[in-house]
Image: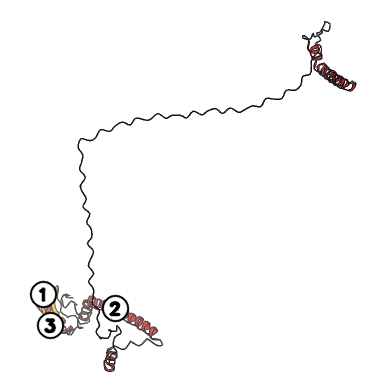
């Protein structure tokens, strides 16, 4: 009995000690957190009064056993399915005129009838695509009919051909140059022929007849240079002087043969001294 009575007594002592310790700790906490007194210049220190009986309440508190938390049973909220209201379809008015669909006639292809080819049982040998050999005589004639290929140029054939071309070109240029020179010489001879005739007449002796005036004598030179015709074109007024002037022209013949295209008819004045 004594032992059983001591157990609750020691338990009460432990609870009391726990309560005292808790009070001491809370008091220290409260002292640390208490605000410092506010000092006012020129006045005395004011004490901050704490209202309430928190300390007494803490001392008088009684420990209660810790209650176990109730087990929370999850409540399943029933999900209400959303109901979609049906959409009323607007009826489509049928068209007044309905086009009749043309019936499509399907053409069924007629299978072709295969005609059986009777098997040829004849003993005719198959024809070979290989050409038959030509007789030797025909082959020889064909080879003889083909022209022989032209021999390839050998040696300096190309250089000779080029030299011949250059030589022919040079000869052609020389011929054209010679023709041009010849034409120039011919033109010079034509233009200088009247001067040759004048020199031929001036080489004759003048008639020694005392007269005054000028006799004009006309004459024509033949292709050979001989005198073809001569006459008095204008008289000097002295018949003897006129005859002497005509004789002077006749004595100058033959003249140099005129070149082709040269002037051959002349009229020369002869003055009396």
Q: Earlier in the sequence, mark 1 or mark 2?
A: 2
| Labels 1 & 2 near each other (Cβ < 8 A) | no
Label 1 sits on residue: 233
Q: Residue at x 13, y 77 (%)?
A: 217
Give the distance between the C-alpha atoms of the residues marked 3 and 1, in whole angstroms.
16 Å
Label 2 sits on residue: 176
Residue 255 coordinates in the image, percent (x, y): 19, 83
Q: Judge by depth and name the residue closer to the eye, 259 or 110.
A: 110
Label 3 sits on residue: 228
Give the distance between the C-alpha atoms of the residues marked 1 and 2, in whole angstroms.
46 Å
Q: Give the quadrant of residue 12.
A: top right
Looking at the image, the residue that sits furthest to the top is 43
Disc 1 on helix, strand or loop?
A: strand
Q: Judge by depth and name the residue closer to the eye, 170 or 185.
A: 170
| Labels 2 & 3 near each other (Cβ < 8 A) | no
Q: In front of the other: label 1 or label 2?
A: 2
State left or right for residue 239 relative to residue 147. left
Q: In front of the other: label 3 or label 1?
A: 3
Looking at the image, the residue that sits furthest to the bottom is 137
Q: Give the quadrant of residue 27.
A: top right
Instruction: Categorize mark 1 by other alpha carbons within 10 Å: few (<14), some (14-19), many (20+).
Output: some
Disc 3 on helix, strand or loop?
A: strand
State left or right for residue 137 relative to residue 153. left
Instruction: Categorize mark 3 by other alpha carbons within 10 Å: few (<14), some (14-19), many (20+).
Output: some
Q: Residue at x 30, y 78 (%)?
A: 177
* Label placed on residue 170: none
């Amino acid at each position: 009995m004594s032992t059983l009575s001591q157990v609750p007594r020691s338990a009460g002592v432990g609870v009391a000690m726990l309560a005292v310790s808790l009070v001491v700790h809370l008091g220290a906490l409260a002292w640390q957190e208490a605000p410092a007194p506010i000092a006012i210049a020129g006045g005395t220190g004011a004490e901050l009064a704490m209202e309430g009986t928190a300390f007494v309440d803490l001392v008088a508190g009684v420990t209660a056993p810790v209650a176990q938390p109730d087990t929370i049973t999850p409540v399943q909220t029933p999900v209400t399915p959303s109901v979609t209201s049906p959409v009323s379809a607007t009826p489509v008015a049928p068209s007044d005129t309905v086009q009749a669909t043309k019936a499509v006639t399907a053409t069924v292809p007629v299978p072709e009838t295969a005609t059986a080819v009777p098997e040829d049982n004849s003993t005719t040998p198959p024809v070979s695509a290989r050409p038959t050999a030509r007789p030797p005589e025909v082959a020889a004639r064909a080879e003889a009919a083909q022209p022989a290929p032209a021999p390839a140029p050998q040696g300096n054939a190309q250089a000779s051909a080029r030299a011949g071309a250059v030589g022919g070109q040079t000869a052609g240029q020389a011929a054209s140059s010679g023709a041009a020179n010849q034409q120039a010489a011919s033109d010079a001879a034509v233009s200088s022929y009247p001067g040759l005739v004048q020199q031929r007449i001036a080489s004759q002796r003048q008639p020694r007849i005392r007269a005054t005036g000028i006799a004009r004598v006309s004459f024509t030179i033949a292709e050979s240079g001989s005198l073809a015709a001569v006459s008095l074109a204008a008289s000097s007024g002295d018949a003897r002087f006129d005859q002497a002037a005509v004789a002077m022209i006749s004595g100058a013949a033959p003249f140099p043969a005129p070149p082709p295209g040269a002037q051959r008819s002349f009229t020369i004045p002869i003055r009396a001294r």
